[in-house]
Image (cartoon, rainbow, N blue to C red):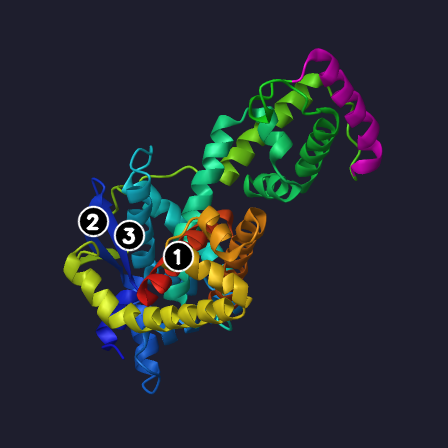
Amino acid sequence: MRPRQEITEMFSTFVELEKDRFSKWLIDIKLRRSIQSCLESSPFVPNSENFWALHWHKRWRSQSNRLARMHLSAYLQEPNYWAAKKTIAKFTNGQHSLADYFQMANAEIEIILKNFNPEKCSSLKAYATIAIPSRLKDILRQRKEADICTNWALLRKVSKKQFLEALDQAGLSPSIIAQYRLAWTCFKELYVQNQPGGTKALPEPDRQLWEAIVNLYNRECQSQLTQPTPQCTREKIEQWLTQAAIYVRTYLFPPVSSLNLVRSEDDGRTTLDLPDPSSDSLIAEMIAQEDAQNKQNQQSQIQDILLKALQNLEAKTQEILKLYYQQGLTQPQIVQRLQMSQPTVSRRLLKARESMLKALIEWSQDTLNISVTSNLVNDMSTALEEWLKVKYGESS
């Protein structure tokens, strides 16, 4: 349990950065009054941050409550800050600052809240601590891919769902979206990826291809569009597709706005003297008081999952793992020791890792409600390799 003042601060304060460093905590007066009112009117509920996190998440989920979202946005400031610190440490040569990464993390709060399932993971902060860095990795990967693609390669690559969501996010009307969609569909149908230099550098369609795209559009628009439209020209189709590529880039990787904007005096926020989240003392306190039990429980569960997956392997496979990780034998040495073929030894090692990785991924999905991405699989694969080394190292 926490003092009510700490609960109030958790759900009403926001980080302000200055020159890419933590500057101060700002308290939102409206949010402070809101959480204080809730605490005063609910004297018998526990003073638990997780209780109130789940309370506000339920209200946000069921009512699309903006106030609930703001409380949760304040609550997730520290996970977002740590995700930004972790990301900038991994991408030291990147073009983005700590403030950029922090803003990106804040922009992902809506998705984090949508993906969080209280029935599978009881702690929103624990889920966010894992999910936010994964989201940032995906965003950076998408941005890198989008940056090196021409407009035409990007339009060939983007999915229908992403394309339509990008147009909707841009605020286009349904009728305009329908025209963009048909133009894009005609483009994808006729623009075959047989160009030299790979798909990322696909050139602009030539004159003959533009004519074919326009003709196909004008034939299909009579049956595909609900509202009658005049015959379209090459210039109009090209303009639509060029603009659509801009919308798609913006959707895949939203532009980052500065966090160091000057605030007006009446914006409803005042400075609050709280500890700097980058201080060592606060890190120690967070680990000791807030996250230690959750982390310990999760580590214990992961240990049990991996041990069970290891025990379910065939005896011969377990013997191969022991020789490989505990005794440090190479695959050719294992072949000689066990009188097995090289492909058999290699296949059994691979299958063992895949089986244990699958168990770890399924546990993450079921327990933490985490969406599996390629970045997450790579991280888990690395963690599994380290676990095997430590596991068999203890037995040597």
Would you call the spot at circle 2 few (<14 residues within 10 Å), some (14-19), or many (20 or more)?
Answer: some
Q: Residue at x 45, y 67 (%)?
A: 306
Of tags 3 and 2, the one toward the viewer is 2
User: In the rendered structure, which amino acid carries the disc numbered 3?
Assistant: Asp
Residue 57 highlighted magenta (yes or no): no
Give how far across and how far down residue 389 sits, in percent.
36, 58
SS for tag 3?
Answer: loop
Name the N-terminal-most of marks 1 and 3. 3
In the rendered image, the quadrant that contains the N terminus is bottom left
Name the N-terminal-most of marks 1 and 2. 2
SS for tag 2?
Answer: strand
Q: Is residue 240 above or below residue 72?
A: above
Q: Is residue 106 above or below residue 393?
A: above
Disc 1 marks which residue? 325
Q: Which residues are magenta?
A: 205-225
Give the side of residue 39 with respect to residue 112, left or right.
Answer: left
In the rendered image, the quadrant that contains the C terminus is bottom left
Of residues 39 and 373, the one drawn nearer to the viewer in this rendering: 373
The CA distance from mark 1 to mark 2 is 44 Å
Give the side of residue 187 with respect to residue 49, left or right.
Answer: right
Q: Residue furthest bottom?
A: 44
Q: Residue at x 71, y 12 (%)?
A: 207
Disc 2 marks which residue? 22
